[in-house]
Amino acid sequence: MRYGKTQALDGIDLELAPGRIVGLLGVNGCGKTTLMKVLAGVVAEYGGEARVCGHLPGPASKALVSYLPDATFLRGRMRVRDCLTVYRDFFPDFDLGKARELISFFELGESMRLGEMSKGMREKVQIALVMSRKARLFLLDEPISGVDPAARQVILDGILGNLDDDALLLISTHLVHDLEPILDSVVMMRGGRVVLTGDADDLRAEHNMSLDHLFREIFR
Ligand SMILES: Nc1ncnc2c1ncn2[C@@H]1O[C@H](COP(=O)(O)OP(=O)(O)OP(=O)(O)O)[C@@H](O)[C@H]1O
């Protein structure tokens, strides 16, 4: 995948199994967002092939993928209840009851307007929407990057409490320390390539260090 002269993804060869929480780790500009966009089916101009549950990215795969992009995708004038309605009308697999529970778990009100919320609060609304679909693949692009440590933990709790056993959660971050406790496996990227992939426990045992430490070693 290229953007003009920039090779954003280069020779990626990756297979991810269901029922796992996978950390997509790497420094700024290594290609995490681009890989997510390929899997989400929002870019099409690339070589090679991606498949989600056997489907090429397109309408069939999009029905199985719940995607949290790295930028806000809801308009500021909307109230939380409007967002719930949009998701209910747009996604047949959206569980309105679950979303309401999550909004309440995050201590937000349905009459609140997005434009009057803090970044962390808006992030929570988006997480509540995205995690309330019965998707097979959840793509969360940096869901905790802009929020304080306490809010990070609440957001992660909200994500984990709402994940089906057979779903795959791919979550990108450079905040490895915060995510490490929930990760089953990791994919580390650099310069558009995968430099390391494996089971979290195996990597910790093999390198005799935490994933956070390993990440710092690799990207030093
Ligand atoms: N729309 C675009 N136009 C041109 N180049 C782009 C565009 N989007 C990304 N790139 C380039 O592609 C490369 C990969 O970017 P990408 O956003 O996938 O990285 P990332 O790992 O998600 O970074 P970050 O952690 O900062 O979000 C970078 O070199 C970036 O400059």
Image (cartoon, rainbow, N blue to C red):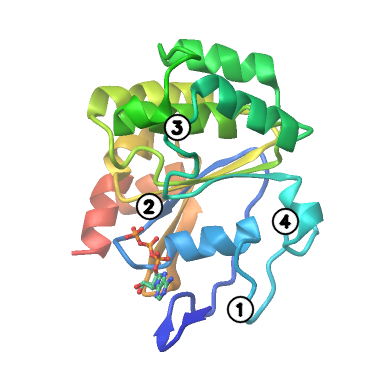
Drawn side of residue 172 relative to residue 219, left or right: right
Drawn side of residue 36 relative to residue 65, left or right: left
The earlier-in-sequence mark between 4 and 2 is 4
Per the image, the residue denoted by label 3 is: 77
Per the image, the residue denoted by label 4 is: 52
Quarter assignment of residue 195: bottom left
The earlier-in-sequence mark between 3 and 1 is 1
The Cα–Cα distance between marks 3 and 1, rounded to whole angstroms, is 35 Å
User: Do residues under tags 2 and 3 come within 8 Å of each other at their CB atoms?
Assistant: no
Residue positioned 61% across, 61% down in the render: 42
Per the image, the residue denoted by label 1 is: 46
Depth check, front residue: 67 or 48:
67
User: Do residues under tags 3 and 1 come within 8 Å of each other at their CB atoms?
Assistant: no
Q: Position of residue 144 (x, y in %)?
A: 35, 37
The earlier-in-sequence mark between 1 and 2 is 1
Per the image, the residue denoted by label 2 is: 206
